[in-house]
């Protein structure tokens, strides 16, 4: 079977054929993001077990190093994929990234030292980091501008669905944590095989490359006056948003345990947090497409501040704790994704991959800083409540960054689109 990616047929396919390709794009991009969400939580879910069993002699400081290097790899992959995807295509980069992280994920349980464990997580992270920007770009380019917030947020429900799956499996396997990595690696290779035969190239990318003005896009393009103001705000907001997402998903079980909650309850809170994330993404996308992406993102960051501050308080009611953690997931996780939605709506097709890759890559620095600082607070014995004070302050910074963003999309002025799309320039 031949991959259905021919640029020659991109503009002449029947409506039924186009619908089928769009369906495959939606499904396969969603599942790819789900795999990254699964990986996001896997380390946080097993850290208590690794430390309790002293696997490979691992200490809290070692766990922090492993978590940090994992995220360094993710950041590298996110930065590299944008320019490459804008030059060579979204499809090939996405499939190669899935294969790379799947293979090295399968090797993680075979590590014979903490150093090898960390190195394998670093290399796997490079492939993993490329998956989300490529998937979000492909999804956005299969949607009209008026639905791009929904495209981003609905795609990212896969992210937190994967996190929920990991949390549920972690509660079942407990000491047999190796199973979590085996499931992820095998699933990734299976998905890559399906992508090879069923995932089409983005038609927006094909059109952009066929245009007379098509050119190689460099990161420096984003520093031009038309994009610079938005770029700075996006990078800061993405940094803060990913700091929150990764900080919470890596250390929430430990922070809850330090607050006095038993380990099963602490791990369950990770599950509830990500269920809230899924609900928040569905809600956030619909609200943003109706009320504007920028305004919605500001509101989401503002509520996040309040929820994170509440978590610093020891709660004696399980229902109250579950509610606050759920609402934290609703607003914190979708606030970050709404930043990506802003990117896909603001930038035109010829720089969209680079812009989204830079937002994800620079933001990933926050994903490194968050677990590192939180890990230091945990090691110092003050993870609770100071970890949540720290997170609340970060959410304030994210709010202020979004406040600086332009209110109109540059893409509306430079990207050919149907009249219905042109009528929706506001973000």
Image: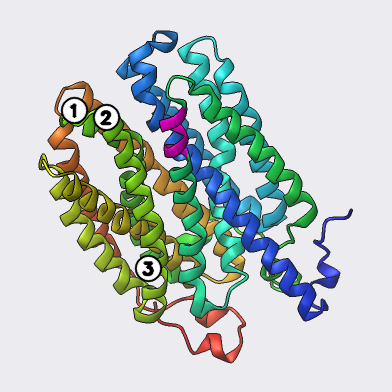
| Secondary structure state at the residue bearing disc 1 | helix
- Residue 283: mark: 3
The answer to whether one can see residue 211 in this image is: no
The answer to whether one can see residue 278 in this image is: yes
**364 shown above or below 48:** below
The total of numbered circles placed on residues is 3
| Pointer 1 with pointer 2, Cβ within 8 A | yes
Is 115 in front, or is 328?
328
The answer to which of marks 2 and 3 sits earlier in the sequence is: 2
* Image position, residue 418 (x, y; %): 61, 87
Residue 292, picture quadrant:
bottom left
Marks 1/3: CA–CA distance: 32 Å
**419 shown above or below 268:** below
* Image position, residue 38 (x, y; %): 49, 41
| Secondary structure state at the residue bearing disc 3 | helix
Position of 397 with respect to 193 (left or right) is: left
Position of 301 with respect to 135 (left or right) is: left
| Secondary structure state at the residue bearing disc 2 | helix
* Image position, residue 260 (x, y; %): 15, 29
User: Dot 2, crowdedness within 10 Å: few (<14), some or many (≥20)?
Assistant: many
* Image position, residue 377 (x, y; %): 20, 28
Marks 2/3: CA–CA distance: 29 Å
The answer to which of marks 1 and 3 sits earlier in the sequence is: 1
Q: Which residues are magenta?
A: 166-172
Say if the magenta span includes residue 28: no
Is 83 in front, or is 161?
161
Marks 1/2: CA–CA distance: 6 Å
Residue 371, picture quadrant:
top left
Q: Residue, x 33% and y 23% (percent of image)?
A: 48
Q: Residue, x 52% and y 67% (percent of image)?
A: 151
User: Dot 3, crowdedness within 10 Å: few (<14), some or many (≥20)?
Assistant: some
Q: Which residue is mark 1?
A: 258
């Amino acid at each position: 079977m031949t991959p259905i990616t021919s640029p020659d047929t991109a503009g002449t396919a029947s409506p039924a054929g186009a619908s089928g390709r769009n369906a495959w794009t939606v499904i396969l991009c969603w599942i790819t993001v789900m795999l990254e969400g699964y990986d996001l939580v896997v380390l946080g879910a097993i850290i208590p077990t690794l430390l309790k069993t002293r696997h490979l002699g691992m200490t809290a400081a070692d766990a922090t190093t492993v978590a940090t290097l994992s995220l360094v790899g993710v950041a590298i992959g996110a930065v590299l994929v944008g320019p490459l995807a804008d030059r060579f295509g979204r499809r090939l980069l996405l499939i190669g990234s899935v294969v790379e992280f799947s293979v090295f994920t399968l090797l993680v349980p075979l590590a014979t030292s903490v150093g090898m464990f960390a190195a394998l997580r670093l290399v796997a992270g490079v492939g993993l980091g490329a998956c989300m920007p490529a998937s979000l770009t492909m999804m956005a380019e299969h949607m009209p501008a008026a639905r791009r917030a929904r495209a981003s947020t609905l795609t990212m429900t896969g992210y937190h669905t994967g996190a929920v799956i990991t949390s549920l499996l972690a509660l079942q396997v407990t000491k047999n944590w190796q199973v979590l990595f085996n499931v992820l690696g095998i699933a990734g290779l299976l998905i890559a095989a399906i992508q090879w035969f069923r995932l089409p190239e983005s038609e927006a990318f094909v059109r952009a490359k066929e245009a007379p003005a098509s050119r190689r896009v460099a990161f420096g393009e984003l520093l031009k006056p038309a994009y610079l103001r938005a770029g700075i705000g996006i990078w800061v907001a993405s940094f803060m948003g990913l700091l929150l997402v990764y900080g919470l998903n890596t250390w929430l079980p430990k922070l809850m345990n330090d607050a006095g909650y038993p380990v099963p309850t602490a791990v369950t809170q990770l599950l509830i947090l990500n269920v809230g994330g899924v609900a928040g993404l569905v809600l956030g996308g619909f609200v943003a497409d109706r009320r504007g992406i920028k305004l919605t993102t500001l509101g989401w960051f503002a509520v996040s501040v309040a929820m994170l501050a509440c978590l610093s308080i020891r709660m004696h009611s399980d229902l109250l704790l579950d509610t606050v953690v759920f609402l934290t997931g609703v607003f914190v996780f979708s606030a970050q994704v709404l930043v990506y939605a802003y990117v896909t709506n603001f930038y035109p097709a010829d720089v969209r991959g680079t812009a989204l890759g830079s937002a994800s890559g620079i933001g990933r620095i926050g994903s490194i800083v968050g677990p590192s600082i939180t890990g230091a607070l945990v090691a110092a014995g003050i993870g609770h409540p100071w970890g949540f004070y720290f997170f609340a302050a970060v959410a304030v910074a994210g709010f202020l960054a979004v406040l600086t963003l332009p209110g109109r999309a540059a893409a509306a002025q430079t990207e050919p689109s149907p009249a219905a799309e042109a009528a929706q320039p506001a973000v």
